């Protein structure tokens, strides 16, 4: 999962979002990452802005909760769910 962590971190930086760290949560049934942002560097950051930036990376589909968690005074934390779609949905209409 290190490749996706690096892709997320550098992809967000390319979009102008300063991400301090990316940590993957080890759960194969529910792949998630925890993103940490400096509250000083990202004063106008919103969860929807992060979601748009992540989904534009081409690394799959990301789902972002709509609120930041403040685990410390200096950092904002955001949990992101990885839901990459690799195949088109199967239609039930017979041809």
Image (spheres, rainbow, N blue to C red):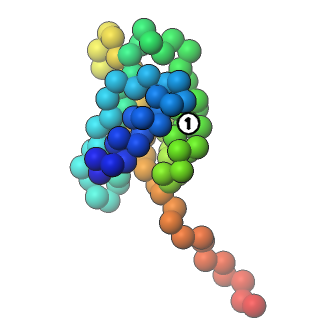
* Residue farthest toward the left in the current orientation of the protein: 26
SS for dot 1: helix
Q: Residue at x 48, y 57 (%)?
A: 84
On-image quarter of the C terminus: bottom right
Looking at the image, residue 81 lies above or below residue 42:
below
Q: Do we see residue 53 in this rendering?
A: yes
Residue 23 is left or right of residue 54, and the answer is left
Looking at the image, residue 64 lies above or below residue 31:
above
Q: Do we see residue 32 in this rendering?
A: no
Write down the residue under mark 1: 53
- Residue 59 is situated, as x and y percent measured from the top left of the image, at 48, 51
Q: Residues within 10 Å of mark 1 (few under 14, many from 20)?
A: many
Based on the displayed image, in which of its 4 quarters is residue 20 positioned? top left
- Residue 41 is situated, as x and y percent measured from the top left of the image, at 44, 12
Q: How many marks?
A: 1
Q: Residue at x 32, y 9 (%)?
A: 73
Q: Residue at x 24, y 49 (%)?
A: 26
Foreground pick, 22 / 30:
22
């Amino acid at each position: 999962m290190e490749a996706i962590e690096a892709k997320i971190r550098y992809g967000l930086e390319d979009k102008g979002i300063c991400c301090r760290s990316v940590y993957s949560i080890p759960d194969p049934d529910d792949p998630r990452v925890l993103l940490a942002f400096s509250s000083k560097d990202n004063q106008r950051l919103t969860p929807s802005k992060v979601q748009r930036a992540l989904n534009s990376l081409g690394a799959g589909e990301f789902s972002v909760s709509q609120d930041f968690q403040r685990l410390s005074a200096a950092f904002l934390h955001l949990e992101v769910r990885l839901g990459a779609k690799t195949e088109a949905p199967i239609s039930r209409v017979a041809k």
